[in-house]
Amino acid sequence: DYFNIEERWVVRLNEAMKKRQDTKAQDIEKLYEVLEKARSPTGLLTVQIGKMECGQFVGKIKPDKDVERMARKFKLDDHVTSRVTELKVWRKRNGEEDRAMKDLERIEYHLRFAKRPNALCTLLVGRLLEGEIDELPDLTNAEKIMTDFKLDEDACSKMREIIEKRSEDEERVLTCVRKHLKNSSNASSMLCKIARQLIDGHDLPDPPERPQKGKGGGKDGKDDGERGERRDRDGDRHHDRDRNDRGHRRDRSRSRSRDRRDRRDSRGR
């Protein structure tokens, strides 16, 4: 009555709850929590009943210390924290306690590079609970590139998203990324530029090779070293010419001085 649920769904809910007597109180409390925030309580209830019937629904549970620590670290709100706890409990109920811990480790790893941890955590946990992915991809190799090229916050966030979407061909994608960043003067800007194509599943052509240091790109095809040598040779020729000119001027000056002395001596005699 509180949510104005249609009678037929109330009947179906009662049938599902009869098979969950051990967790009835927790289930009811959890239903109140999720339906309170729903735009369409009836529509969301049908989804939750479906989860009950296939064993995926997790009732209200006590906070988990590992989840609480992560929630404090990334300032996750109560709803998101509850979803992470739900994931961990669901794994344990299926006898996958090791996977539950691995989930938390990977989620925390991804949140380190998130600009909006709440939104990202909701997305990642949802994909795991819905079975869209078996596990989150490891970011170890991607983080090495982030460190090597000193990527900024925006670029690191994009790199994380690339690996999330392209985990199946991660090695090939990272090789491509490294080539583009190596040939760029601004690695962070380049990563943000190429990210969308990679996230959308497209491949990138290899970048053009950057000229090596000391190499020029003039029309004559000469490198800087050759041009430098030519300038040195030209400079030497100019220097020699200047020195010769000065020598000629001195010789002419001496000749004129001798001529003047000779004329004075002739007049004296």
Image (cartoon, rainbow, N blue to C red):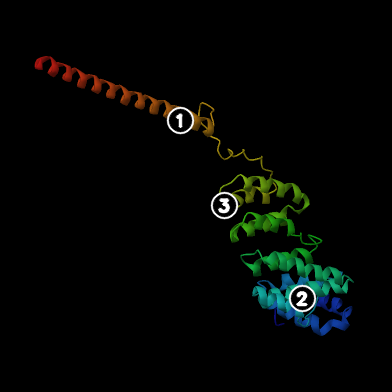
Closer to the N terminus: mark 1 or mark 2? 2
Q: Quadrant of residue 90?
A: bottom right
Residue at x-position 57% and y-position 52%: 189
Disc 1 packing (10 Å; few <14; some 14–19; many ≥20): few
In the displayed image of the protein, which residue is found farthest to the bottom?
A: 25
Disc number placed over residue 85 in the picture, else none: 2
- The residues tagged by marks 3 and 1 sit, at their Cα atoms, a distance apart of 38 Å
Asked whether residue 228 is in view, the answer is yes
Looking at this view, is 231 or 154 the one in front? 231
Taking 220 as reference, is 127 above or below it? below
Disc number placed over residue 231 in the picture, else none: 1
Find residue 248 and report its horizontal and vertical position in percent: 30, 21
- The residues tagged by marks 3 and 2 sit, at their Cα atoms, a distance apart of 37 Å
Three-letter residue code for mark 3: Ser
Find residue 27 and report its horizontal and vertical position in percent: 80, 80
Helix, strand or loop at disc 2? Answer: helix
Residue at x-position 21% and y-position 19%: 258
Taking 23 as reference, is 126 above or below it? above
Q: Of circles 3 and 2, which is in front?
A: 3
Disc number placed over residue 50 in the picture, else none: none
Q: Which residue is mark 3?
A: 189
Q: Is residue 17 left or right of residue 241?
A: right
Closer to the N terminus: mark 3 or mark 1? 3
Find residue 104 and report its horizontal and vertical position in percent: 77, 70
Disc 3 packing (10 Å; few <14; some 14–19; many ≥20): some
Q: Is residue 39 left or right of residue 253?
A: right
Looking at this view, is 9 or 62 the one in front? 62
Residue at x-position 32% and y-position 24%: 247
